[in-house]
């Protein structure tokens, strides 16, 4: 089974995300994706994608400090 069991849903006319609420979702199974010719790759769809470029863009000069603080995470 893939996906989240609930999702944070924000009304279209809301100005702030704080006005959202949890909304249950329908689970998806790998077979459903395959039937629709969607290849499932667990690493691509289920793991966060954070690389050096993203870290440097986000944290600038502090990127190395951030990476050393979170050294348990493979970047």
Image (cartoon, grey):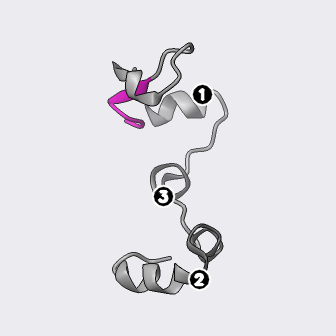
| Residue at the disc numbered 1 | 35
* Magenta stretch in the rendered image: 1-9
Mark 3 vs mark 2, CA separation in Å: 23 Å
Kindly report which numbered mark, 3 or 1, lies closer to the viewer in this rendering: 3
Kindly report which numbered mark, 1 or 2, lies closer to the viewer in this rendering: 2
| Residue 29, image x, y percentages | 43, 31
Quarter of the image for residue 36 reads top right
| Residue 13, image x, y percentages | 56, 13
| Residue at the disc numbered 3 | 48
Circle 1 Cα neighbour tier, 10 Å, few/some/many (<14 / 14–19 / ≥20): few
| Residue 43, image x, y percentages | 50, 58
Q: Earlier along the polypeptide chain: callout 3 or callout 2?
A: 3
Seen in the picture, residue 45 relative to 75 is either above or below; the reply is: above
Q: Is residue 51 magenta?
A: no
Circle 2 Cα neighbour tier, 10 Å, few/some/many (<14 / 14–19 / ≥20): few
Question: Can residue 40 be seen here?
Answer: yes
Q: Indicate which disc residue 61 carries.
A: 2
The quadrant of the picture occupied by the N terminus is top left
Rendered residue at 40%/86% (across/down): 68
Q: Earlier along the polypeptide chain: callout 1 or callout 2?
A: 1
């Amino acid at each position: 089974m893939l996906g989240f069991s609930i999702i944070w849903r924000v009304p279209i006319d809301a100005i702030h995300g704080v006005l959202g609420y949890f909304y249950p979702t329908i689970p998806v199974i790998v077979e459903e994706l395959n039937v629709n010719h969607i290849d499932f790759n667990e690493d691509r769809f289920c793991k966060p994608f954070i690389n050096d470029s993203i870290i440097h863009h986000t944290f600038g000069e502090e990127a190395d400090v951030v990476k050393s603080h979170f050294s348990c995470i493979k970047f």
